[in-house]
Structure formats: structure tokens, C-alpha cells
Image (spheres, rainbow, N blue to C red):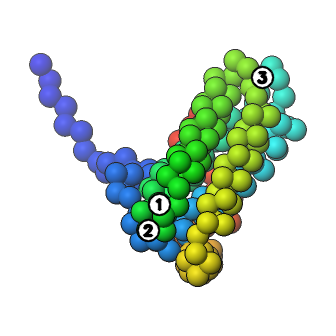
Amino acid sequence: MTTVELTGEPARAMFNADLDKPIEDGPRAIAVTLAAKRALRDVLEQNNLFKETCEAPVFACDLSQLNVKTSSRVSGPLRRSLPALSEVYGIDPYAVDGVLQNVSTLEAIFKANNARVKVDFKGGPEMIGLIDSGLEAIYQDLPPEALAKGTEILESCDLTVDATAEGTLECRISRAVAQNKRPSGGQS
């Protein structure tokens, strides 16, 4: 029997690293949710582009990109940051859970699309609308100074730094969106 030793760097997801480590700092958690919201707009734009350019029955585009972007730039970051808004600012945990459930549904839609059995370019935008309105309702319940501080943290990100460079989660997400970086992973 031959023994093979595997070497190399461990695989690392760009935005989903440390999913088991919640973001506990309130203003930073707000900044991460705002960055995820930017990423959500990017996913919506790509979905709309695919709706116009990715024709049935072949769907000759990489439909997995919608799910990869949603999982890595929206879902993971929101799962790490939204619970802090309940703990730090008293945001209704059911509102947080509602947003996270809608994100899970969005991921399921995009996973099904990638299977190319029945591609649904309408369900994604509907779920994105629900996620967006859920986040807006949460922002309205935040103390204005906390939302301003979270916005300030996000706006301080240098978007000219390479998207794959080290940095805070909110800055890495914002740089990836601003630089139109294609996420790694996925397949067509």
C-alpha cells in the first residue's frame, strides 16, 4: 500500500472565513451589512444581465456565479453580522431571522438555476427585494448615530486596494464589488 502525503495551503474562502466567529462590534457589524447590501445590488445586476444574455436552452453563461457571489459576499457576512445588531442594539431577532431566511431562499433559487433544469431569473430579484426591504427596516430601527458610524466605517475603505488583499470584511466585499471581481469557485 502506498502512502501519499498531501501538502499545500488549506483552502480559504475569501469572505466566509471565520463563519463561526460572529462580528460582535456593533458599528462594524453595521458596516458589514451595508457592504453585503452593495454586493446584493451587484448580484441583482448580474442576474438581470444573464436574463438578457444567457438564453435557453443552453444557458451558455456561468450561472454558478450568482450563487457563489450570494454565498460568499452576502450570506456568510450577514450570518456573522446581523445577530450583533440584536445583541448590541436590541433589533428584533425575528427581523434578523427573516432576512437570513430570505437569503437562504435566494441561495436555493440560484443553486437550482445552476442545475439548469428550470432557470428562474424572476425569483432572485423578488428575494433580493425582500432582503433589501428587511435590511432597510432594520436600519430604521438602529440608533441614527450607530448607523452613521457603520456608514463611516464602510466609506473609509480604500476601494483602490486589490480586492484579494488582506483587510476587514466590509472592505474586502466593497473592493470586490467596486472592482467587479469574479469570485473564485463555481462552474458552468
The front one of 7 and 140 is 140
Q: Residue at x 47, y 60 (%)?
A: 86
Looking at the image, residue 31 lies above or below residue 102: below
Disc 3 residue type (three-letter)? Val
Which label is found at residue 69? none
Q: What is the distance, in whole Å, between disc 3 and disc 1 at their CAs? A: 45 Å
The front one of 178 and 130 is 130
Disc 2 residue type (three-letter)? Val
Which is nearer the N-term, disc 3 or disc 1? 3
Using residue 122 as the reference point, say whether residue 6 is left or right of it. Answer: left
Dot 1 alpha-carbon crowd within 10 angstroms: few under 14, some 14 to 19, many 20 or more: some
Identity of the residue furthest to the left in this view: 1
Q: Are marks 1 and 2 in contact (CB under 8 Å)?
A: yes
Disc 1 residue type (three-letter)? Ser
Q: What is the distance, in whole Å, between disc 1 and disc 2 at their CAs? A: 6 Å
Q: Which residue is mark 3?
A: 58
State which mark lies toward you, 3 or 2: 2
**Quarter of the figure with the C terminus:** top right
Q: Which residue is mark 1?
A: 86
Q: Which residue is mark 2?
A: 88
| Picture coordinates of residue 164, whole percent (x, y) | 51, 63
Q: Residue at x 34, y 51 (%)?
A: 20
| Picture coordinates of residue 96, whole percent (x, y) | 54, 52
Q: Residue at x 58, y 45 (%)?
A: 98
